[in-house]
Amino acid sequence: MRFRSAFRIPHSALRTLDRYLLREWLRVFLVTLLGFPILVIVIDLTDKMDQYLGRGLKPLTVALSYVFDLPEKMFLVLPVAVLFATVFTVGSLGRHSELTAAKASGISFHRLVRPLFLAAAASFIMGLLLGEIAPVSTAKRLELLGERAVQSLPMRDNFVYRADGGWVYAVRGLDLRARQMTDLMLEREGSGVDYPTIVLAAQRAVYSDTSRKRRSRAPLAHWTLYQGALRYLEGSDPVGEVAFEFDSLVSRTLRETPADLLAQPKAPDEMRYVELRRYIDALARSGSNAKKLQVELALKIAIPCICLLIALFGAPLAISTPKSGAAWGVAASLATTFIVLLMFQLAKAVGSGGVLPPVLAAWFPNLLVAVAAVYLLRKAPT
């Protein structure tokens, strides 16, 4: 004869409880994720409204610029939203004795909050997506506010363009209609014999996107340089120089189209993960200090990842004082948020200064939160 426990809850009831927890968690999460950025935007708009109107910007343009500013602010506030949602959802269970009833029914604390950990994992994926969208939206916002000029003329004179792979182009003139450049110099700074400095200079370059000759080995879209010279240097000094002149040369390095060269080069904070990694690799090969950018690159993964750890930390934190009210939850969440944000700022300074390796500095706040989460989970009554 088999006996069933009087406190056993059917599987369907667990699903109902899971849906209830996810609904409550999602409600607080969305309010925090959207509320904090909107609050910051309102403060910033109040402070800069006179400045925007003085520059002749239309109210609709200003409003649209703040819409493009949302992804970056949501990316930064994502761990805060996860923390608030976890603390308030779990804390409400303890205040209303729902947590005690669940334990009496045979449901452990870890099983009860498992849906919240899955929701935090979804926020990690959301953070990765926001991290890729934020650089593009930031660039668009700067264009709308006139803080990043958009080249609309068909010509550009005397400019420098920073390309991928550590290449820098110095061009005297670019004509979009004729699709050609005059008096250009391409340079990639090296660090030694294995990675030499390359200087390519030409009087004229013509862009072609079709191959006129069927047997031509030139790519379908390419630049042809005329009347120039190519030099290889061991490092940045003219030691061991190898140079030769040419009448015409098809460049595989100069891959940008004339329209690309009309636009301004991207700043590091406007680059996506892959673009920033390529830029850092080029700086490292050329011997430049890229520690600050290496920290920024690591933070693009570390900040979304801390959402998982914040959920593991916030769930046992919420039941540490089960009889406390909502004010304690707000105070604990704000204090934790302040400490985590402060640790990320310190990580940037420590990593940029070389006190710690950049990747370790970026992930150090995650390690501290993980240790605190394990400690609280072990002490939490299950």
Image (spheres, rainbow, N blue to C red):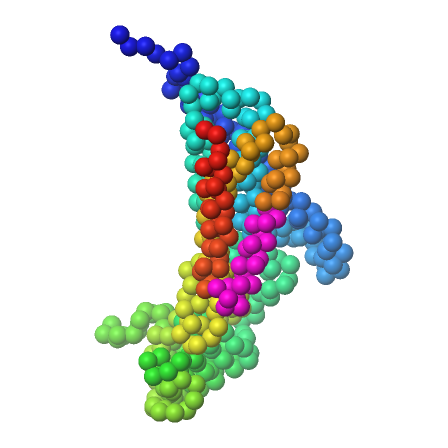
Q: What residue is rendered at 54% in x and 26% in y?
A: 93
**Vertical comparison of 127 with 240: above or below:** above
Q: Residue furthest top?
A: 1
Q: What residue is rendered at 59% in x and 56% in y?
A: 141
Q: Main secondary structure of the magenta part?
A: helix
The C terminus appears in which quarter of the rendering? top left
Viewer-side residue, 81 vs 256: 81
User: Residue 348 appears at what percent x and percent y?
Assistant: 54, 61
Number of callouts = 0
**Vertical comparison of 364 with 314: above or below:** below
User: Residue 183 appears at what percent x and percent y?
Assistant: 48, 85
**Vertical comparison of 320 with 198: above or below:** above
Viewer-side residue, 92 vs 199: 92
The N terminus appears in which quarter of the rendering? top left
The reply to whether residue 167 is visible in this rendering is no
Q: Residue 98: within the magenta?
A: no
Q: Residue furthest front?
A: 379
**Vertical comparison of 309 with 160: above or below:** above
Q: Residue 355: within the magenta?
A: yes
User: Residue 46 appears at what percent x and percent y?
Assistant: 74, 50
Q: What residue is rendered at 43% in x and 31% in y?
A: 110
The reply to whether residue 108 is visible in this rendering is yes
Q: Is residue 180 left or right of residue 77?
A: left
Q: Is residue 23 left or right of residue 142?
A: left
User: Residue 358 appears at what percent x and percent y?
Assistant: 47, 63
Give the quarter of the image for residue 57: bottom right
Q: What residue is rendered at 55% in x and 33% in y?
A: 320
Question: Where are the magenta residues, as a range?
Answer: 337-356
